[in-house]
Image (cartoon, helix red, strand yellow):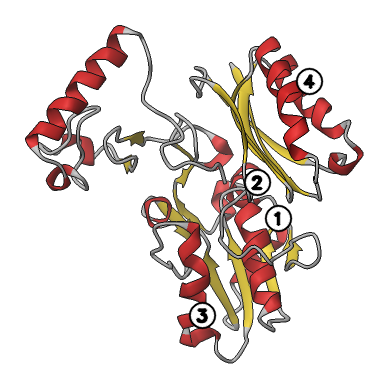
Amino acid sequence: MYLVAAFYRFSSLPDFEALRAPLLALCHDRNVRGTILLAKEGVNGTIAGPASGVHAVLAHLRADPRLVELEHKESHAETQPFRKMKVRLKKEIVTMGVPELDPNETVGTYVPPEAWNDLISDPDVVLIDARNDYETAIGTFEGAIDPHTKSFRELPGWLEEQEALKEKPRVAMFCTGGIRCEKSTALLRARGFEDVYHLQGGILKYLEEVPEEESLWRGECFVFDERVSVGHGLEPGDYVLCRACGDPVSAEDRESPQYERGVSCPRCHDRYSEEDRERFRTRQRQMDAEGRGPASGARGEPA
């Protein structure tokens, strides 16, 4: 079994570029793969490998006094869910496109998983899913508003247009691991909202800690690695990734004549020409010959 760790920490890192080389070298030395993003505002990543290697990388990050409070969530995979190790330098560790926001200054109130059900069951609370359409399509919390965004950059504009938010009600937000809600709730606070909450540790922590029989989660949770989705207890789900468009594909969709592994799925079949699909077939044959699994991280930043 491979240990998978998802983590982030907002903290001022003006020297973030200098952190890249030693971090990448350690990951290679410890047979750890995945993606880590470094920026002036902090660090964000998902990595996988032998437990000793993953823990060594986390210890290395926490050795920096600015990252000593870095939190992580663990799960397991039977196969290595990443093909490569990448440490990238970015303007933001999760791209919202509102550079003046600083989650180090103000965010919403953290709500632990065990208290989340009571909060979102309150009829006076507006519950918002801060994720994108390909994620919400396979699972969300009961009663949540789906913004139908295609990228996190679209969320600020969507929030501005919502009539339900005009009177500044109590707002609860959630996302995969918590990082997008740090910025989302910081944005609402900057816009004058006072009663703003978000799920501490994100959906992943909720699925890990809340028993399925008590859960208000419906469906599966999209994750940014080759497991594609997880369910309660963070058990791997039933979805696979469409190599053509990067969307999750259900078992039912895989029965469709429009689904071809590595080539198309029902959501993207009509989007591509036969020439495109032939290129995808060639790519899939090359991947099969090299023993490589489906592409991961098609959506970019881990969340």
Residue tagged 2: 205
Residue at position x 14%, y 31% in the image: 277
Residue tagged 3: 160
Q: Position of residue 158 (x, y in %)?
A: 46, 73
Is mark 1 in CB contact (under 8 Å) with mark 2?
A: yes
Q: CA distance from mark 2 to mark 3?
A: 29 Å
- Closer to the chain start, of discs 1 and 4, is 4
- Side of 125 where 162 appears, left or right: left
Q: Disc 3 marks which amino acid?
A: Glu
Residue tagged 4: 56
Is mark 3 in CB contact (under 8 Å) with mark 4?
A: no
Residue tagged 1: 200
* Relative vertical location of residue 233 with respect to residue 129 in this rendering, above or below: above
Q: Dot 3: few (<14), some (14–19), or many (≥20) neighbours within 10 Å?
A: few
Q: CA distance from mark 2 to mark 4?
A: 22 Å
> Looking at this view, is 199 or 28 the one in front?
28
